[in-house]
Image (cartoon, coloured by chain):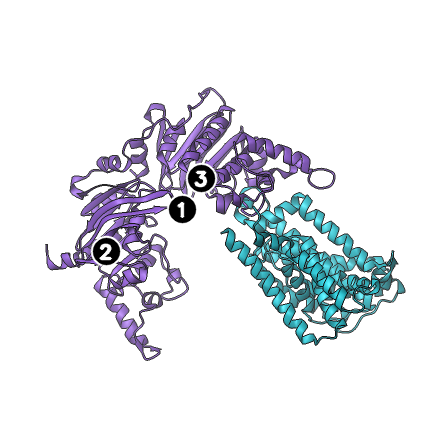
Chain colours: A cyan, B purple
């Protein structure tokens, strides 16, 4: 029994994205060119990597605000290791390990200390940002080896390695969510925690795992970002998490948990990128872009709320 | 009849109320008088709470009229009823736990000078009410730190801190210790002596017999009789509340091999505040009914056995081995299955598919080389859904699209998919239409016939009588009766449930 609202909730984002693509292809010169689209893919790769696993965390019933801090700080640890050893492989491993550790801290705070995930990860954000300033001695860091830039900037079949990594991450996250026991448990825990507990699901372990995976994904995105710019810099800039959350929410993942899909998050990330890119090509005032982005978020959440009320 | 008594008289005539297709009240007429404590008794679902809600404007009757203080009264919101002096103290307290006694008493009734609250006058007014009804409390105390009995006094005082001429108490002593319950009864008497009409909904019959002046019995939404308390006995009340038991709606029970090794042995199970010193045995193929009132500790006991709730003392032996450091996944692995009390809150994932709902606890059985092996999972789930006679379109449909009875069958399909040895069924027919109940009964008896032990928890006494080989009755966390075979009858169960200590 699919009513129109449910159908729109499930496939609306795809429809709207295709529509926007067609409109821009017709109206904006230079939009539907191979080069432009390759650029969009490359630029969005980092948001897509983090957003895929943010989707899983939100479905499991938790927010994670700290992805910005992990995104900024993990590559600083990686570059510190690279500067010390000259080994790029070790650097990446160190950055991902830091992401894993930060995810573990978030998981502990939320599932064991029972602190609201939004507040808990806001608090850890500051701690993680702080760690970034410490490890970098408050200054810009650069890789010593030229190999570091190849992490994100190698090319294969015309696409950058960052794009290929994002594609791989999306596939892994999709399989994880839709084809494994863990994925089913994520939906169960976020949908009805008590019922999940009574069905024998290890609720805390599932939610902690979601944080761990998201920590690693955010660190990976951070490494790609530092590789693209061949540098990393400590800051307390929260903008990355907003881009990630926007993609997840516009993709129709329920902020209450228990509902969502990776492909919809990915589609929404492209929708937002097209919007951005199209406005630039059409030379429209960026202020309009913000207004429309805000309106899009409200619409996405409203559709989610309405479909819920209909079923209640 | 004094002037005061007439003025505080509420008459309900021919009141009816239906929810969907269920008649909660049909054609009930009763009069409540000032100066008296008037008790409403009946089994769960008899309509006493509905009647209370109608008096307070929480529910509007479908038919019938109310007369208050000699005039026809029409109200459809609690606020309108409050204005007329009709107030209620519900079972669940609705207090602001972080605020002071004074704040709770005077919210919405502050004495004001212009837009400003006059703290001193407000305090004086609250103090006056406490003095008048002899319930002294520290107005500065934080409500959350008070014992339950005092919190309840705050709730009562709040009702009295306004014009209150008829007060409905819904299960006022359910959460109180016996000495506190007695003190509360004195408060009720004091209020009645001041001319107020007191309506007391209670399931504790001794309490009702000792404190009430008048008792009205309801059964299945129908008025049975109103009598003065001195003319009733516990036996007469139980008989009036239960009527004649319905026979023939249950499948025949399989016989139990009494020589078989017990499947589940619980001894000395205790968790403070929930249940005390419980011992029970279930053999393969045996259905043990756990009866008692809501809140008697039945679900808590079931959850403790299943590893989902606390067990402070005592031993649970399952299949010959003692369970220590028990958890739900341990219980599931060893062959226990639970159909929980509330399918919406504890059982189902409403917007997920039937498939996912059924297979969730047993996903490890369907692991393939790349995640879940969808083919095997679908085939198994289908088999067990058909085994429960579940009516569905496709396995991918969300369970929210199913009827209550079919949603319950999803939980039974889940339980049977695990091929368990013990089934714990907590209120298995709650919210299921009368016609669909037999299907659930057949499932329970069918599972017992296959050699499963069944622990059946139900508030519906017919279910306990019709489905159990043996019945344990709990009252306030203790076993007050264990009945076998011919000794299982309604009066014996009810008498034990209503708490002979």
Q: CA distance from mark 1 to mark 2?
A: 25 Å
Q: Mark 1 — residue?
A: B273
Using the rendered view, name the quadrant where residue B501 is placed.
Answer: top left
Cα separation between marks 3 and 1: 11 Å
Label 3 chain ID: B
Q: Are marks 3 and 1 in contact (CB under 8 Å)?
A: no
| Viewer-side label of 3, 1 | 3
Residue at mark 3 shares a chain with residue at mark 1: yes
Q: Nearer the viewer, residue B262 or B434?
A: B434
Instruction: Check disc 2 and report the residue beneath it.
Output: B187
Give whichever of discs 1 and 2 has the lower sequence position.
2
Mark 2 vs 3, N-terminal side: 2
Among the 4 quarters of the image, the one containing residue B498? top left
- Element type where label 1 sits in the image: loop
Disc 1: which chain?
Answer: B
Identify the residue under disc 3.
Answer: B301
- The numbered mark at residue B407 is none
Looking at the image, which residue sits at the far left? B1
Q: Marks 2 and 3, Cα distance to the nearest angstrom?
A: 34 Å
């Amino acid at each position: 029994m699919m009513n129109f609202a449910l159908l729109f909730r499930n496939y609306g984002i795809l429809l709207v994205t295709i529509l926007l693509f067609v409109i821009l292809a017709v109206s904006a010169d230079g939009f539907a060119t191979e080069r432009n689209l390759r650029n969009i893919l490359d630029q969005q790769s980092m948001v897509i990597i983090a957003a895929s696993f943010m989707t899983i965390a939100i479905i499991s019933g938790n927010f994670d605000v700290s992805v910005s801090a992990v995104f900024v700080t993990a590559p600083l640890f990686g570059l510190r290791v690279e500067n010390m050893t000259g080994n790029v492989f070790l650097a990446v491993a160190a950055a991902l390990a830091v992401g894993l550790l930060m995810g573990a801290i978030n998981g502990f705070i939320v599932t064991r200390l029972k602190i609201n995930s939004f507040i808990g990860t806001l608090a850890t954000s500051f701690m993680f940002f702080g760690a970034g300033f410490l490890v970098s001695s408050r200054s810009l860091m650069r890789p010593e080896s030229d190999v570091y830039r190849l992490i994100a900037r190698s090319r294969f079949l015309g696409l950058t390695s960052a794009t290929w990594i994002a594609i791989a991450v999306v596939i892994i996250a999709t399989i994880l969510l839709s084809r494994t026991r863990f994925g089913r448990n994520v939906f169960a825990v976020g949908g009805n925690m008590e019922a999940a507990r009574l069905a024998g699901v290890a609720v805390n372990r599932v939610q902690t795992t979601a944080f761990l995976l998201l920590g690693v994904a955010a660190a990976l995105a951070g490494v790609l970002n530092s590789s693209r710019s061949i540098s990393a810099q400590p800051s307390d800039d929260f903008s990355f998490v907003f881009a990630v959350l926007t993609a997840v929410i516009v993709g129709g993942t329920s902020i209450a948990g228990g509902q969502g899909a990776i492909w919809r998050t990915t589609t929404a990330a492209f929708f937002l990128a097209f919007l951005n890119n199209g406005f630039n090509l059409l030379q429209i005032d960026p202020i309009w872009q913000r207004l429309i982005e805000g309106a899009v978020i409200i619409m996405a959440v409203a559709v989610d709320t309405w479909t819920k009320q209909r079923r209640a | 009849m004094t002037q005061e008594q007439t003025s505080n008289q509420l008459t309900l005539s021919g009141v009816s109320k239906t929810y969907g297709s269920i008649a909660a009240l049909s054609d009930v007429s009763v009069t409540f008088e000032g100066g008296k404590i008037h008790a409403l008794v009946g089994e769960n679902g008899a309509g006493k709470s509905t009647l209370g809600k109608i008096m307070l404007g929480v529910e509007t009757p479908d038919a019938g009229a109310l007369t208050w203080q000699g005039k026809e009264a029409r109200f459809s919101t609690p606020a309108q009823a409050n204005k007329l002096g009709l107030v209620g103290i519900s079972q669940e307290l609705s207090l602001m736990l972080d605020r002071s006694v004074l704040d709770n008493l005077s919210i919405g009734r502050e004495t004001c000078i212009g837009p400003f609250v006059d703290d001193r006058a407000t305090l004086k007014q609250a103090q006056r009410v406490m003095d008048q009804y002899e319930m002294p409390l520290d107005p500065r105390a934080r409500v959350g730190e008070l014992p339950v009995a005092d919190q309840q006094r705050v709730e009562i005082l709040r009702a009295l801190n306004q014009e209150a001429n008829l007060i409905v108490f819904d299960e006022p002593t359910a959460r109180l210790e016996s000495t506190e319950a007695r003190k509360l009864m004195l408060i009720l008497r004091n209020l009645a002596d001041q001319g107020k009409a007191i309506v007391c909904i209670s399931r504790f019959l001794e309490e009702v017999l000792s404190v009430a002046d008048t008792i009205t019995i309801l059964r299945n939404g129908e008025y049975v009789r109103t009598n003065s308390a001195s003319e009733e006995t516990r036996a007469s009340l139980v008989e009036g509340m239960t009527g004649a038991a319905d026979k023939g709606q249950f499948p025949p029970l399989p016989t139990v091999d009494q020589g078989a090794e017990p499947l589940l042995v619980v001894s000395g199970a205790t968790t403070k505040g929930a249940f005390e010193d419980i011992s029970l045995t279930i053999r393969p193929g045996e259905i043990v009914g756990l009866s008692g009132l809501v809140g008697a500790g039945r679900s808590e006991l079931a959850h403790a056995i299943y590893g989902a709730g606390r067990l402070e003392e005592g031993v649970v032996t399952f299949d010959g081995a003692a369970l220590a450091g028990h958890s739900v996944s341990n219980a599931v692995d060893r062959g226990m299955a639970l159909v929980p009390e509330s399918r919406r809150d504890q059982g189902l994932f409403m917007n997920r598919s039937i498939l996912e709902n059924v297979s969730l606890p047993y996903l490890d059985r369907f692991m393939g080389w790349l995640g879940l092996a969808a083919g095997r999972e679908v085939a198994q789930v289908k088999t067990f859904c058909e085994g429960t006679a579940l009516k569905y379109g496709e396995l991918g449909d969300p369970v929210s699209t199913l009827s209550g009875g079919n949603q319950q069958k999803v939980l039974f399909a889940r339980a049977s998919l695990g091929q368990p040895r013990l089934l714990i069924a907590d209120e298995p027919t709650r919210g299921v239409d009368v016609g669909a109940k037999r299907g659930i009964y057949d499932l329970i008896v069918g599972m017992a016939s296959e050699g499963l032990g069944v622990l059946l928890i139900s508030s519906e006494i017919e279910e306990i009588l019709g489905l159990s080989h043996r019945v344990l009755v709990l009252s306030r966390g203790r076993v007050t009766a264990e009945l076998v075979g011919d000794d299982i009858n309604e009066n014996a169960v009810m008498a034990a449930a209503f708490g002979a200590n």
